[in-house]
Image: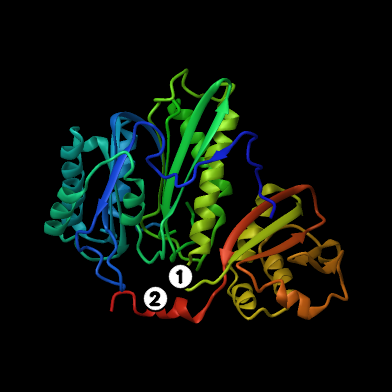
Amino acid sequence: MPHPTPEPSGLEWIAGGHVTTPAGFRAGGAYAGIKTYGDDPRLDIGILGSDGPLTVAGIFTKNAVTGVSVTWDKSVLAERRVVRGLVCNSGNANTVTGDQGERDCARMAALAAARLGCDPREILVGSTGVIGRLLPMDKVEHGLAEVALTEDGGLRFARAIMTTDTHEKQAAVRITAAGRTYTIGGCAKGAGMIHPDMATMFAFITTDAPADAAWLEATLRDVASRTYNMIDVDMDTSTSDTALLLASGLAGGEPLTAAHPAAAAVAAAIEAVARHLACGIARDAEGATCLIEAVVEGAASVDDARVVARTITSSPLIKTMVTGRDPNWGRIMMAAGRSGAQFEAARTSVWIGDIQVLQVGQPTEADLKAVSRAMAGEDVQLRIHLGAGTDAATAWGCNLTAEYVSINADYTT
């Protein structure tokens, strides 16, 4: 399946890699009893940290109702202080919790800071889960005391941030550029409430590359525009969305800037990890049985391509079309038409898998049973060429099943 940005040459995927694969990071997770729903308690509290200062960039939900942790993190980053780590919990979003929620967030940061030997304002916080309930701070304190911070603790941290996810999302790569080798690792969580405007989604990427703060922030925003912000499960945006990019600098050399000879390759490697994590979120969506990839080509602008791709992956009619393997390809045209993009139906072509169902505005004589079979696998591609220009974009989503309704109808009961 085509992707918007090709992987750089020499990119090496590291088997079993995770968020602490790059040098300079330690992590761990424990079960505190915060997350009580579901059959398997898993882990629900974790710390990701470093023994030295980290350069960090962050982007957050644009929901008008934000979690206390989002407010805290924005404040920490605005101060441009040295950052040493991140503490997260799942099962409770600490959102709409008033003054007590603010005190609890600060307490979480202080507890994690004590473990890392730093100031609480050098700690970022992430809380995800049920909205409107106070954190059980006695459980938080006990759980954080149980977290063992190790250089191979990335897997436990990735599991600690999960809510309704069925498995952890993590990856790591290695890239050699301009005579130096850099490592990038990451983890993410999210399965429902996914429609990022920056979803219930966390995404944390680490690297041992030294990086200029401005370059790091620009890279994260650019990468997110093609990865995290191009996935959809259910058209709801969370109060807690947080994406962070943290650099330890232990690979050595001059800090990466836009002019650095390794900058483009490292940015592409960061995007490869982010895309892997984003697709993992869409694939593991609540109740989903397949990943839907919407490829839009021939758009008049990148913005048009993106809005069409996201409209296709977020359409309930298309999600259910794929679930039922219904060769009702007109729904793809419907979604594109309501997206607001500029194009003409008479110039448009559509494919489901490798089968063309519309050719420059004219329906083909495609075998509809074959079209149905093209939607039977774990990966379903829907492609549309708008015939309006040369720009393209890709978005990822999932099908919609009865299990999604069941999971969310019983979420707190």
Position of the C terminus by quadrant:
bottom left
Picture coordinates of residue 317, whole percent (x, y): 62, 76
Q: CA distance from mark 1 to mark 2?
A: 9 Å
Write the residue at 65% across / 54% down: 394
Q: Residues within 10 Å of mark 2 (few under 14, many from 20)?
A: some
Kindly state the secondary structure of the residue where label 2 is placed: helix
Q: Are marks 1 and 2 in contact (CB under 8 Å)?
A: yes
User: Of all residues shown, which one is farthest toward the front?
Assistant: 15
Q: Position of residue 75 (x, y in %)?
A: 30, 40
Residue density around tag 1, few if under 14, some if 14–19, many if 20 or more, within 10 Å: many
* Nearest the eye: 278 or 100: 278
- Give amino acid for label 2: Asn
Comparing 376 with 333, the one in front is: 376
Decide which of tag 1 and tag 2 comes sooner along the chain: 1
Q: Amino acid at mark 1?
A: Glu
Question: What's the colour scheme?
Answer: rainbow
Is residue 60 in sight in this rendering?
no
Label 1: state its secondary structure: loop
For residue 7, side relative to residue 285 (left or right) = right
Picture quadrant of residue 286: bottom left
At x 53%, y 63%, the residue is 283
Residue drawn at point x = 60 percent, y = 30 percent: 264
Camera-near label (1 vs 2) is 1
* Residue highlighted by disc 1: 286
The residue at the point 53 percent across, 52 percent down is 229
